[in-house]
Image (cartoon, rainbow, N blue to C red):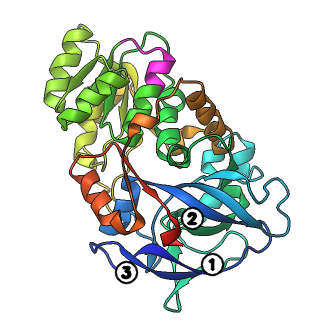
Amino acid sequence: MKTKGALIWEFNKPWSIEEIEIGDPVKDEVKIQMEAAGMCHSDHHLVTGGIPMMGFPVLGGHEGAGVVTEVGPGVEDIAPGDHVVLSFIPSCGKCPSCQAGMRNLCDLGAGLLGGTAVSDGTHRITANGQPVFPMTLLGTFSPYMVVHRSSVVKIDPSIPFEVACLVGCGVTTGYGSAVRAGDIRPGDDVAIIGVGGVGMSALQGAVNAGARNLFVVEPVEWKRDAALKFGATHAYPDMEAAFAGVAEVTQGLMAKQVIVTVGELHGKDVDNYVNLTAKGGTTVVTAIGSMMDTDVSLNLAMLTLLQKRLQGTIFGGGNPHFDIPQLLSMYKAGKLNLDDMITRQYKLEQINDGYTDMLEGRNIRGVIRFTDADR
């Protein structure tokens, strides 16, 4: 079928809304009419080249929610009419990683940047006769998708699509960074570095886990104010202020967990994050940097002598097929505030405006809402 999507054809150029053609679902695939897509910073890394796909053009978007319209042979647990969220990492449930309980590290994830379908190894999308490389095998910046069933998570149909799309990446990643990778316990002092969509979700995870003092480091003033409403106890504009403030509040013990959720990670900053971490504490690195950045500043002696832990995490270290419905059930029960994380909604044609707003600090999370005009 022919539809449209937001493409990039080369690095450091704006998104372009163009006609694309998507193939029909084959075995184990699902066709979805998209209703909403979250605008995550990771998609901006496609533009800068920080996350390089295997070719151009690239169809962006890896947070999304919609309605199933068709299923291919072999799909029995998903049916037309189901409301679904797309998991940006497929989760097969059968590979060694999934069997070991690490479904966020499913072996199918090895092909996320390759652009070819899990089902048959072909390109499912074309533009002007050329193969298109969809972000994490999804490409949610289009009003229609055909994806493998391992990336599709059925949800409660009463959840608004603009809310549901956020748990496809940002909310699940941030919340899990706190409660799973960070293993925050009641009474822990916790610092969150950067409070966009992922950071604000980590903040809510820390609150629900029982953190005592919850420090936020965020250069944008209105985001610091928002973080205090979401449950932070202290907010600082930069790391220098945070060092002084956290040391004063904790009598020099510092933060048991430091969750790094900045928009772009730089190796030169890692030592600062570890220095903010208490003896025996954990620095959780959730933010992603350029794949070309291999230089890291870190005092290795102090890492050893103070027995600190530097922990990377993807998708919050959880199980998307379990965590996504669970987090949405918490939202429905009033235990997770996702409504106030949506700062603005955009039309697909406004995608460049949305990313400008993100980069200039005007959004916690922007969401694209698809309309009939897009289809």
Q: In this view of the protein, can residue 346 be seen by the observer? A: yes
Which quarter shows the C terminus?
bottom right
Q: In this view of the protein, can residue 298 be seen by the observer? A: no
On the image, numbered disc 2 is attached to which residue?
A: 138
User: Which SS does the magenta portion mostly show?
Assistant: helix
Residue 310 located left or right of residue 173:
left
Indicate the amino acid at tag 3.
Answer: Trp
Quadrant housing residue 245: top left
> Label 1 near label 3: C-beta < 8 Å?
no
| On screen, residue 42 above or below 17 | above
Residue 206 included in the magenta stretch of the image = yes
Residue at image position (27%, 10%) is 250
Label at residue 124: 1
**Bounds of the magenta span?**
205-212
Q: CA distance from mark 2 to mark 3?
A: 17 Å
Residue at image position (42%, 14%) is 188
On the image, numbered disc 3 is attached to which residue?
A: 9
x and y percent of residue 38 in the render?
A: 45, 53
Residue 178 included in the magenta stretch of the image = no
Question: For mark 2, does the 10 Å Cα neighbourhood hold few (<14), some (14 to 19), or many (20 or more) residues?
Answer: many
Q: Assign a secondary structure to mark 3.
A: loop
Quadrant housing residue 10: bottom left
Q: Assign a secondary structure to mark 2.
A: loop
Residue at image position (36%, 16%) is 189
Q: CA distance from mark 1 to mark 2?
A: 10 Å
